[in-house]
Image (cartoon, grey):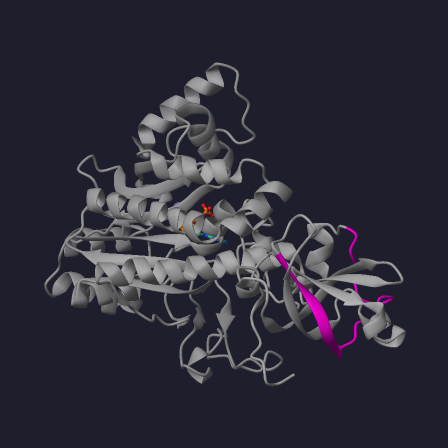
Amino acid sequence: MDSIHRSKIKALLTMEPGAEVLAKGWVRTKRGNKQVKFIALNDGSTINNIQVVANAELFSEDLLKKVTTGASLSVKGTLVASPGSGQAVEIQASEIEVLGECDPMRFPLQKKDTTLEFLRSVAHLRLRTNTFGAVLRIRNAMAFAIHKFFNEKGFVYLHTPLITESDAEGAGDMFQVTTMDLKNIPLDKKGNVDFSKDFFGKKTSLTVSGQLEGELGATAVGEIYTFGPTFRAENSNTPRHLAEFWMIEPEMAFYDLEDNMELAEEFVKYLVSYALDNCMDDLRFLNDKYDEGLIERMQGVIGIPFQRVTYTQAVEILEKAVADGVKFEYPVHWGTDFQSEHERYLVEKYFGKPVILIDFPKDIKAFYMKQNEDGRTVRGMDVLFPKIGEIIGGSEREASLEKLEARIDELGMSRRNLEWYIDTRRYGSVPHSGFGLGFERLLLFVTGMANIRDVIPFPRTPKNAEF
Ligand code: ATP
Ligand code: MN
């Protein structure tokens, strides 16, 4: 067997008949009769299986019995034109070795269709399904495309820390990091926790965003992006929130909000196009199985300019909708943060295209956003997508030292822990902007999956950190 190099199934399926080949993979299904068995073999290189034809004369009954769904095989044979529909070639097997058996009585992923919910309970094995194979390949393609996009633009990939003393969003939903003995927490004289005894000598947490450090990078080398995990202890059990998710955060010196919006729009269009150009087999599978509108929706967003609208205009549209009888679960008026139902109304019902919302009330946005002249709004931007709602959140940053410090004070935040950040405004401050794209939100859009738990291999949500 060893004289022939193993070929990936993706490559085999495009080869001309005639060659002697070696394939390895896992059995998806086996069917046939006493004389001949048809084995569908998959190795993860493509959604498509290769059909292995095993003549019963050549193989012992004992061996063929071990060829069950989930078992792993090494198969040598001749690639021949396939008389069956659905594939150009198949393998006429001459040697089959069962590398690992798979007990059909116990293996949870049998042929019968399993629900996504059930698959979450066996997340260590669900990666073996067609669905998760497709999702993982698309996820990989998107990660690659993100690096490609920024690399071609000359952005520097900046690694920002995961353990931090600061709360970038000011939302307070952070996971604390400590090595203190929870049964014996050191206290100071006043009875407060004495963090000087903790590992870092300070209270630390997992980061909710790499932005603040990203700004240090941008004001040094011009244009950077981060791409890493972020952690939010928000107790929101929604289909769009994870406790651990990946975020891409570009940060650019000399960009105003206009430049920022242009980059964000170009970026997401590039990624959606990349998926359409490189992942069509997987997209077709997901389109047919889960979301008939997937490919059309993807083609839709790359073809048209996104709608830009101010928060204030959007409130007027939503208030008018309510007056006209549209029912929302949450109230909406100037000053409220939009819920995804409002975002989706704007995108799907009112404009019929992706929307970039700008100029939000300052009280619903983070301290670092650039303040507008009106004294009540800031230069934030949210990109809203069909079916998802917010996919990107960003802003032009406040570049004025005075205004930034005043805002920090106004919010009752401690300046002391942020001096390093404020230094960017003390020494050669420049207009700059950036945004955060939630990687899994993007994946919801380009896979058509409805639940964010199904676009990350091992989801972390409240009460769930298994696997
Ligand atoms: P949302 O309003 O949807 O909760 P946010 O306003 O808290 O989001 P930002 O702080 O602006 O989000 O974060 C930037 C991006 O990160 C969001 O646009 C979204 O794509 C993504 N994101 C935020 N929170 C989560 C989460 N818990 N799980 C997955 N992605 C998230
Ligand atoms: Mn936001």
Locate the N terminus and report the quarter of the image it occupies: bottom right
Q: Nearer the viewer, residue 438 or 40?
A: 40
Q: Is residue 454 left or right of residue 371?
A: right
Residue lying farthest to the top in this orientation: 324
Residue at 16%, 56% (x, y): give it. 401
Residue at 42%, 21% (x, y): give it. 319
Kindly indicate the quadrant of the structure image that contains residue 249: bottom left
Is residue 349 shown above or below 376?
A: above
Q: Position of residue 269 (x, y in %)?
A: 35, 45
Q: Position of residue 410 (x, y in %)?
A: 28, 50
Locate the C terminus and report the quarter of the image it occupies: bottom right
Residue at 31%, 42% (x, y): give it. 381
Which span of residues is magenta-colored? 89-112
Say whether residue 290 is visible.
Answer: no
Q: Position of residue 251 (x, y in %)?
A: 26, 58
Give yes or no for residue 98 being in the magenta stretch: yes
Q: Nearer the viewer, residue 365 or 96?
A: 96
Q: Nearer the viewer, residue 447 or 34?
A: 34
Give yes or no for residue 312 being in the magenta stretch: no
Say whether residue 53 is visible.
Answer: yes
